[in-house]
Amino acid sequence: QGRMRARFSERRPTQRQRYLLAGLAYCGWCGNRMIGLTRRQSWLRKDGMRIRRTYQYYQCQSYASHGVCANHGWKAADLEKVTLDKVQKKIIALSSSKAEQSTLWSDAQEFDDTRETGTQTSQSESLRRRYLRYVRKAAAGKISMAKLRILLDGIAGSSTTPSFQSVAQAQRMVSDPVSWDTLEWIERKGYISMVLDRVESKGRDIVVVLKH
């Protein structure tokens, strides 16, 4: 009979599998981390063509490793979308006035223009390269998220640090959907790590905690 056959495999993320909230997501039930898992499904159709699909999830490490937690997880894209929406709203809510919010958007746009015209000083560009290098190492699993935060804090503490590397600028970039959409994934990872302390998932309930 022409029955469909399916194969599943799960493994932790490799360098090519990107999880924006890696190191930031926690289970609201047991307190353990939410880890990124990739599931690959393959099946054979009746016409003989093999179909392959890849799905990414965040899953409680306790459940993934031992099956002992009720928090089974989220699709990666869904958790990232909900989290980003909550982070954006929370940052905007922290603004004390509409004037400050207007400045927030204009500052972010000025940064976009600066990136396009390449008017940064050589010293600022050197700091930017360091920033991206650290984030790439974290994304590749070469350094921990804790180490990344220490390194980024060191850059942000420099008196010559360009504005886009400050926490305030990171908040602007994250909270402005237009600016966020222009960023490369590696830049998004760096900015969200500077802004977000943790996100807790308890079933469908999501709580975000900002840094500072």
Image (spheres, rainbow, N blue to C red):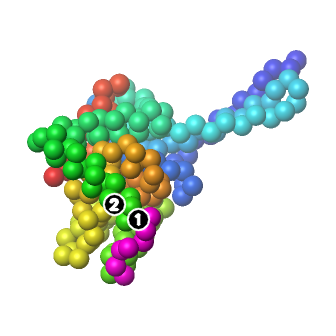
The label on residue 111 is 2
Q: Looking at the picture, which amino acid does disc 1 mark?
A: Arg
Gap in Å between the C-alphas at discs 2 and 1?
6 Å
Q: In the displayed orientation, state which residue is furthest to the left.
A: 96
Magenta range:
116-122
Q: Height in image: 127 above or below 171?
A: below
In which quadrant is the N terminus drawn?
Answer: top right
| On screen, residue 153 above or below 23 | below
Task: Give the amino acid type for the residue marked by disc 2 in the picture.
Answer: Phe
Which residue is at 37% across, 65% downward? 114
Closer-to-camera residue (24/80)? 80
Dot 1, how many residues are within 10 Å of its Cα: few (below 14), some (14-19), or many (20+)? Answer: few
Residue 180 in the image: x percent, y percent?
40, 48
Q: Is 147 placed left or right of 116 in the picture?
A: left
Other-residue count near label 2 (Cα within 10 Å), few / some / many at <14 / 14–19 / ≥20: some
- In the rendering, at what x and y percent does residue 91 appear? 22, 42
Q: Is residue 197 visible?
A: no
Q: Is residue 72 above or below residue 18?
A: above
Query: Was residue 121 drawn as part of the magenta stretch in this picture?
Result: yes
Q: Quadrant of residue 160?
A: bottom left
Q: Which residue is mark 1?
A: 115
Foreground of the two, 138 or 119: 119
SS state under label 1: helix
Residue in the foreground of this view, choosing between 82 and 36: 82
At horizontal 46% and vertical 44% (from top left) the residue drawn is 36
**Pointer 2 with pointer 1, Cβ within 8 A:** yes
Q: Image point 76% across, 27% down: which residue?
A: 5
Q: Position of residue 64 (x, y in %)?
A: 45, 37
